[in-house]
Image (tube, rainbow, N blue to C red):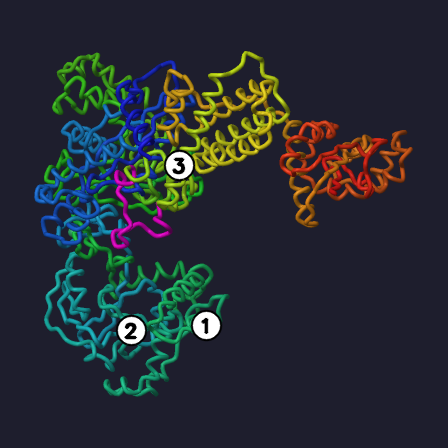
Amino acid sequence: MEFLKQIERKWQKKWEEVRIFETIPDPNKPKFFITVAYPYPNSPQHIGHGRTYTLADVHARYMRMRGYNVLLPMAFHYTGTPVLAMSKRLAANDEDLIDTFVRIYKVPKKLLKSFYDPLNMARYFHEEIKAGMKEIGYSIDWRREFTTIDPQYNRFIEWQFEKLRQNGYVSQGSHPVGWCPNEGNPVGQHDTQDDVEPEIEEFTLIKFQYNEWILPTATLRPETIFGVTNIWLNPKVEYVKAKVDNEQWIVSKESVEKLRYLNRKVEVVETFNGSQLIGKHVKNPATNQEILILPAEFVDPKNATGVVMSVPGHAPYDYVALENLSKAEVQLKEFGLTPEIVVAIEPISIIAVSEYGEIPAGDVVKKMGIVSQLDPKLEDATKEVYRHEFHTGKMKPNTGKYAGLTVAEAKDKVKEDLVEEDRAETMYELMNKPVFCRCGTECIVKIFEDQWFIDYRKPEWKKLTHEWLDKMRIFPEELRAEFNYVIDWLHEKACARKSGMGTRLPWDPEWIIESLSDSVIYMAYYTIVRRLKEHNIRPDQLTDAVFDYVFLGIGKVNEVAERAGLEPSVLEQMREEFSYFYPLDSRHSGRDLVPNHLTFMIFNHIAIFPEELWPRQIAVNGSVLMEGQKMSKSYGNIIPLREAIEMFGADPLRLAVLATAELLQDADFSPTLAKSMQGRLERLYRFAVETTKMKASETAEAPVLTTTDRWMLSRLQYHIGRATESMDKLAVRKAIHSGLYELEQDFQWYLRRIAEERESLKKKAATVEVFSEVLDAQVRMLAPVTPHICEEIWEKMGREDFVSLAAWPKPDESKVDVSAEENEALIRNMLEDTLNIFKATSITPKKICYYTAASWKWKGYLKALEKSVSAKIVQSELMRELMKDADMKKVSKHVAKFVDQIIDEVNRMPNEKKRRQLKVGIMDENNALKEAETFFKREFNAEICVYNEEDPDCYDPRKRAQLARPYRPAIYVE
Ligand SMILES: [Zn+2]
């Protein structure tokens, strides 16, 4: 372990000294520009982050070895609430957080106070994260590092927003947003605990009349108004009578604040218990029917108005609640009601749907065996009924002018009409509540008035984004549908807030641009930031005209430069560097950024840049589990990245997070796994040392390769091909399996086969050649994943450059040797078959005889293969064909028996295998087995005899020889 650490430090130092990852434009090389979502410096990175960044680094290193001029930069996202909220919670003495900082993140206690200033916290973790990225060996060009509060970056974001506004993508208006009442800010996914996106839904509030009061029942299915049998209020919670705008409403006490955030004027007149209204009658505004108010505890006062209409025919909750209530005699008595009154309320059927009978809610409830209104299965039941009714349901004749409409049509129409006639209103509510802000406050919906939005609803913009997505590579491909869904679903997004660090809106500076809006085109900034630093360019020199020139090629360089007080050559350098590296070739992130950042990135590139500069590829990976469990502070199983590097080493850690899962799967990390990776890498190193020593004492003799040597080299080409194919698809797990595990398995077999001969002088040169070729290819294949140990081995091999800059191996077609592979397969099969005989008979063998097939059998077998490639063969036809041959005719009786033995097997054999065997032709099995004699002798500790079944002096006491078939020599053991 200490040894691995030394190697890591050595090579990280060398990379830095020789600056091998600092990238500049090279017109003679194709470029590959790859970025990962920059981190929020509000905590150290842990193993989960390690996976995303390591994957990007592996991708970068692979492309570099494939001959690309690769740029992998990094920056830090100071802006937005993630840093700010953490700092505020510390300042508020949040004990949980303090504990996490001190115990898990190992932050010195005396520093905590300074973190009350978010900038200090960001700077601290910035350095912490950067140190981790260096210690794990990422191939980053650190000259391009920046933070999102650098004044030059602020200018860049101002330019971005000016562009968006000029092109009509920014609007001012009133829209519902997720909101933190404590901080007075809109909240998006990056502002909430557990990173939940607040989902907003519009309820219809239908105004039922109770004397001069209105009971606004909240529903997502206004079309069911015709099936309402009663109203539900929760008898155990408080309601209020209140003046809402110009009307008198009865709503839950909890809804008052929410209505106010939705811009309604609410004056509470009286607070009372819900039980007081139970048993009273209200009027249905659609049917004018008088119905009862009944008690129901499932009514959540926090959901919309806390007043609910009951549609037992189509709503499973209502169906079960009515059933429950009809049996609750004691409870009913409290309200002066009786079970008979409730039993008399019959569900009304208003929608015809083929999947159910008259009363869909009743059918589903019975099917799922639901008996209590508190049963969580009611959620599924509700969804199921809704799904069927929405897709195939038709409104029945008892729904007036809506009769015959589909449910989908009626839903919108009824709502529209009721609102039009002032018999209903709408109310926004969070569907996935409770959602908590990072500050700990529960989020609500607010109508955000006269605020700034990026208008992701624009149809033309959506269309372009869809079309571009179709052209992008998405890894894994299965996520494409999710992107399409997000593009459709996105609407106006609040893009500014009043507090925190960040860039001010250039035209309305009391607003600060939020963090999912100031991080969508920054990849472009990486291409020029190096020059900004080099020439000490001030923010005021970065005029909009400068950015227009650099990024869009607008304007005359001399004029733009002169006005900005810059040298024209500096502008030209920046333009050149941007033009060289853009567009972005690959964007990496975790899956949580699909519904926001990654999609915003596509949208914004389309809004600002010409088509040839839009991003080419997105790669998304799943998360990391810790021994099967989600990593979380509450499980106490978070290992900060630097600690993990210290514990397991950089290379074993990189291997452990990538070797167990394909892109989208969750990787399951465990300390045991990481330790076993250490063991593997140490074995690799020992093999390397042995190989390089052999080479040193190599004889001058030219190598003569045996079949087994040729087999090993042939397999090596296969593994190289597989690893390359996998890496091209970012299937890193598969690539590791080819380049490490499977190659090693073959190599172990090779060692077992040549064990005896290895020391013989004649063999040595060939062995050295095979060992060296395997090692050379393996080191190259593993270099992207475990770069440190590979550099060390590379050096041991006497190479003077870096393996990080060496070429990825290419399969050498001239070394693919099908007959060597078939030969080796034969030996392996004979080994297994013989061992199976030992097992079955439990004898200790003294002598083993192998009988290979007669030459006429080979002829017949190959003919059968040839015929069966195009179509299934029939016994009689094959016989007729074979009898044309004079040699065959002589043994015709045996031929018939032989054909009978092989025909099924040949018909079942995959065509690829047939083609391989046809390519090999008649194999000299006798020779192959004789060559392996020493090997078998050693494996079985017995005398080995090899005969052809037609040998006149064949020792065959049990008449086994006649059973021999091509690729299936017969065996006799005594
Ligand atoms: Zn908050």
Task: Give left or right: position of 293 versus 687.
Answer: left
Q: Which residue is mark 2?
A: 284
Q: Secondary structure at mark 1?
A: helix
Return the disc, 3 or 2, that comes first in the chain's sequence. 2
Q: Which mark is residue 469?
A: 3
Contact? badges 1 and 2 (CB < 8 Å): no
Spot occupied by residue 569 in the image (x, y as percentages of width and height): 21, 12
Q: Which residues are magenta?
A: 624-645
Residue 644 covered by magenta stretch: yes
The answer to whether residue 461 shows anywhere in this view is no
Viewer-nearest of discs 3 and 2: 3
Q: Amino acid at mark 3?
A: Leu
Task: Give the Cα separation between the discs numbered 3 and 1.
Answer: 43 Å
Q: Secondary structure at mark 3?
A: helix
Displayed quadrant of residue 271: bottom left
The C terminus: image quadrant: top right
Q: Which mark is residue 363?
A: 1
Q: Amino acid at mark 2?
A: Asn
Q: Is residue 262 above or below residue 596?
A: below
* In-front residue for pair 421/597: 597
Q: Secondary structure at mark 2?
A: loop
The answer to whether residue 355 shows anywhere in this view is yes
Return the disc, 1 or 2, that comes first in the chain's sequence. 2
Q: What's the residue at 15%, 50% (across, down)? A: 98
Spot occupied by residue 346 in the image (x, y as percentages of width and height): 39, 79
